[in-house]
Amino acid sequence: MSNTYMPISISLKDRICLIIGGGQVALRKIDTLLEYNSDITVISPEVDDKIEYYAKKGLIKLKKQKYSSPEVESFGLVISASDDEEVNKQVYDDCKERHIPVNVVDNPPLCDFIFPAVVRRDCLTVSISSDGKAPFLSGHLRYVLENIFPPHWNKLVQLAVKYRKDVLKEWVGKPDQKRRAFERFLDVDWKTLLDQKKPALVENELKRVLVADPPIDNANDQNVDEEKSE
């Protein structure tokens, strides 16, 4: 029976992760986990040269040996990418018995979690998944999203993070003003501004949209303002 996966964002910082396998598939999973500051141990009698390099650099821990049940018990997340299906099944069974999240590569029925196709722009992450049923489709959609979120979005996201802090500080206790400030930010043609590569222009625009507020044309809002001024 196939699984349905709930989208969830989880911090892997310093999480103790185990990867069984030393080939190209295992390497891709290592590269992914390294992006999220995981504590990675790899178990495999033979490994790709780049995995050896990572171990020598201290980026991962490497045990050049066969998997021995139940080595998974001291880990918080496990990926099995062995070319031996019996090993993969043993790893899965060991993890399920101990309630450890496990991913057996290219075998969705043996996966508690899967890796979606991801587009990342600074702290903004957009992910697409087909629950492992049609990964070629989610992979294609990732390329579509790469064009929807071009590289200037990295800077835009950084601006948005800073701007949100400024809004929360400027408009304490004023939810309507906060909402309008966020709307003004979203109305700006940031791509054009960023393409000019003039930080002063960007900073001036951030200041403008932070405090500028269009005239209130709602009668109820106007009455409230009049009452406050009396």
Image (tube, rainbow, N blue to C red):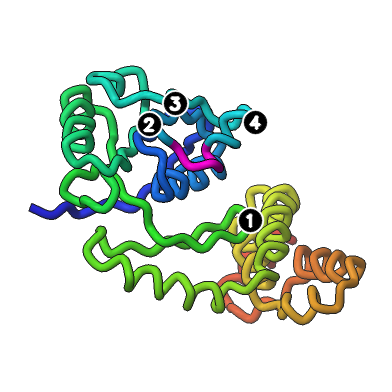
* Of marks 3 and 2, the one in the foreground: 2
Please give the label number shown on residue 122. Answer: 1
Q: Magenta residues: mostly which secondary structure?
A: helix
Magenta region, residue range:
47-51
Q: Quadrant of residue 189?
A: bottom right
Whether the residues at callouts 3 and 1 have beta carbons within 8 Å, the answer is: no
Frontmost of labels 4 and 1 is: 4
Q: CA distance from mark 3 to mark 4?
A: 18 Å
The quarter holding residue 26 reads top left
Circle 3 residue: 16
In the rendered image, the vertical position of residue 109 relative to residue 207, given as above or below: above
Nearest to N terminus: mark 4 or mark 1: 4
Rendered residue at 23%/31% (across/down): 91
Crowd band around label 4 with a 10 angstrom C-alpha radius: few (<14), some (14–19), many (20+)? few
Disc 2 residue crowd, few under 14, some 14–19, many 20+, Cα 10 Å: many
As shown in the figure, which amino acid type bears the numbered disc 4? Lys
> Which sits earlier in the primary sequence, circle 2 or circle 4?
2
Which residue type does callout 2 highlight?
A: Ser
